[in-house]
Amino acid sequence: MKILMIAPQPFFEPRGTPISVYQRVNALSKLGHEVDLVTYHLGSSPEIPNINIHRTRPVPFINQIKIGPSWVKPILDLLVFFKALMMLFKNRYDVIHTHEEAAFFAYFLSPLFQIPHLYDMHSSLPRQLESFGVGNFWPVKPIFVWLEDQVIKSSEAIITIDSELASIVKRTNPKARHINIENTAVSFNTGFGVENTLPTPAEIRENLNLEGRTAVVYTGTFERYQGLDLVVKSVEKVKDQYPNVKYVMVGGKPHQVDELREIVAEKGLEEWVHFTGIVSPEEAMIFLDAADILLSSRIEGTSVPLKVYSYMHAEKPIIATNLEAHTQVFNPSMSVLVDPTIEGLADGVLSYLDNPEKMKLMATRAKEYANEYYSTASYIKRVGNIYEMLQTPYFVSKKDAMRSLEI
């Protein structure tokens, strides 16, 4: 099949939805499909067979984009819309596959060009706006609630990534052709060209002076909802009982790291906390192998963090906050679930340090569970399944198709 994929994100960057997009196109490549990916002018360009990246024209004053809503998004999204429209006039596609708000574009483009629409639903956009303090402004939330409902009702097929989103789809459109495809362990082994320059786990431990120390590793973004200020403050209690512990915080933009460094300096924790700054996606995965304990400290939100699948495959003990974002995947037999507080995060790490055998057992269970439910082979198969669903006829006539645009 020839697919037009519309991803209004900086592709590729090692965060959230861009990682999901990377995993989708990788799977589609392995399934033998050809994909024209329309995306922002920002990001790196991995080389993946049968995947052609088509970027919007650069906007001189936009060199980066933060996670969540921002004033630059409408500008970039408008450029993506017209780029996709141009591609549709030039080429014939079998499917329009959209991510996030690009689904709103396909609500109009799909019936107009009589091409089925596959909505890749990574989050509920009204709830996401609410989480970032934007959706509370009238009439923003009602508009996005209506748009999301219309997209779910009109899409030919829908992918969700967790049980909460799946329930929204089933409630809104019980007849939807829908599949839940949880993400899998992140693997960046195609087209970045840095494999030969990466350190080994042993070299990372040596460079960070981790010999004889227990490395508690966090990887991911440093946004406020990750709760990293609580993590840093929790180190004080842990190091008082286990002075050989060391927290390694992987990622973070300079200003975000500087804010956390101030807390570290204020509490005199420099010996127990190390910040790597931003590293390549491939190197971030190697830090998992270098870790003794892995930490996911999110304090709000319901979407499952992508990192947790890689954590499980790494076969290392996992500490996670007891939120729906984690409990959709984890249970108490494979990870320690703690309150999203300073005390809870500290006690979670201490519970592992007090019982090393428990650490090994739970890590093994998490690995076994990931192998059974979140393997790469299973992921690719499910992506193939949703595309098989799209082989059946979808529009009876152009007249019927245009009815979906009636308001």
Image (cartoon, helix red, strand yellow):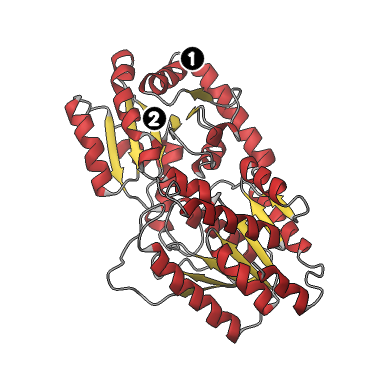
- x and y percentages locating residue 144 in the rendered image: 53, 55
Q: Is residue 142 visible?
A: yes
Spatial CA distance of label 1 from label 2 is 15 Å
Mark 1 and mark 2 in contact? Answer it, CB < 8 Å.
no
Q: In the image, what residue occupies the spot 19% across and 34% down? A: 262
Foreground pick, 191 / 391: 391
Q: Is residue 181 left or right of residue 242?
A: right
Q: In the image, what residue occupies the spot 23% across and 39% down? A: 259
- Above or below, comparing residue 52 to residue 264 in the picture: below
First in residue order: circle 1 vs circle 2: 2
Q: Which mark is residue 150?
A: none
Q: Is residue 188 visible?
A: no
- x and y percentages locating residue 384 in the rendered image: 72, 59
Q: Is residue 178 left or right of residue 37?
A: right
- Above or below, comparing residue 42 to residue 100 in the picture: below
Quadrant of the frame with the N terminus: bottom right
Local SS, label 1: loop
- x and y percentages locating residue 117 in the rendered image: 67, 67
- Above or below, comparing residue 128 to residue 85 in the picture: above
Q: In the image, what residue occupies the spot 41% across and 17% down? A: 347
In the picture of the structure, the residue carrying the numbered disc 2 is 216
Quarter where residue 249 is shown? top left
Foreground pick, 238 / 229: 229
Crowding around mark 2 (Cα neighbors within 10 Å: few <14, some 14 to 19, many 20+) is many
In the picture of the structure, the residue carrying the numbered disc 1 is 355
Q: In the image, what residue occupies the spot 40% across and 38% down? A: 226
